[in-house]
Image (cartoon, grey):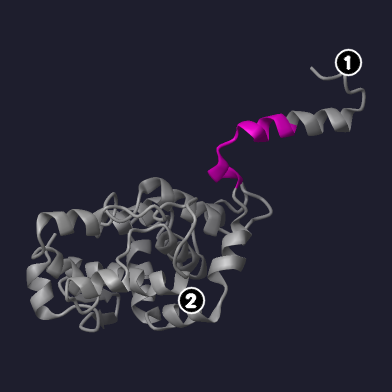
Amino acid sequence: KHSRDIPDVSDCCDKFLNDIMEKVDPQAKVDADVFRESRFYNQECEVAFNAHIYPLKMIFEKFSMMNPQAGKARFGIDESIALFGTTKMLGNQIMIRDIRLAFFQSRMIVVDEVRSRAKFTTLSFVEFLEMLGRCADCTHIPTSEDIEEVGADGVMDYEVKLKEVDPDTFSRLTARRPSATMMAPKSRPLAEKLDKFLRMLIGRIAILYKGTLVVGSNTVKFHKYITPAQLQELKF
């Protein structure tokens, strides 16, 4: 196609690929390391994860056994979507497109995508944590000011108190923020959003499993995340 104008084969291939990249969706051209270096790899995010690490491991193991392959647990894209779907966060707090992007951007590179198919299509626990970090960054999460405005004590109490506010306040507080998408500029540090996001996710898992999650011989009680009164008030 370009041989008359560009006699060199390598330059011709370079132009061909650049022409393709100009038409690719901007979200497909995101460098996954930019988020890691600018938002994710810091002490504050590590502290946020460590505060919730045990229930997160249990949740990861529980959803990994939803669709085991040859008896082996796996956490793939379907399990990622199911996690947010069963907790009723899908569509309200986060969009399915953002979950997919978070999943694919959190995977580590494999040498051979065919021979390492299982690794290529699933997440390890560490990659799962990164996916949660990316999801937190594009989820509609109340600010500390929002929580204080309704007189709530934490994100789960916020969901209870939202039912008591007037319609105008409810609409304002539940409207998706401009920053609640993958590509939008962010207005808050990730660690601040991450802690609230994890408490919201784990709190909703607590509702789903009535306050106690059992995985094999291990058990986690969610009294740290939700009160008995909130379990009664917040039902799916």
Q: Position of residue 24 (x, y in %)?
A: 59, 35
Q: Position of residue 89 (x, y in %)?
A: 27, 57
Query: Which comes sooner in the sequence, label 1 or label 2?
Result: 1
The label shown at residue 141 is none
Q: At 45% from the left edge and 74% from the top edge, which residue is drawn?
A: 191
Q: Nearer the viewer, residue 113 or 174?
A: 174
Q: Secondary structure at mark 2?
A: helix
Residue that carries the numbered disc 2 in the rendered image: 45
Is 85 placed left or right of 116 in the picture? left
Tag 1: amino acid: Arg
Q: Residues within 10 Å of mark 2 (few under 14, many from 20)?
A: some
Q: Nearer the viewer, residue 34 or 108?
A: 34
Task: Tell me the quadrant of the picture where the N terminus can be found.
Answer: top right
> Which residue bears the numbered disc 1?
4
Q: Amino acid at mark 2?
A: Cys
Q: Nearer the viewer, residue 180 or 133?
A: 180
- Which span of residues is magenta-colored? 17-29
The residue that appears at 66% across and 50% down in the rendered structure is 112
Q: Using the rendered view, name the quadrant where residue 231 is placed.
A: bottom left
Q: Is residue 131 highlighted in magenta? A: no
Direction right: furthest residue:
7
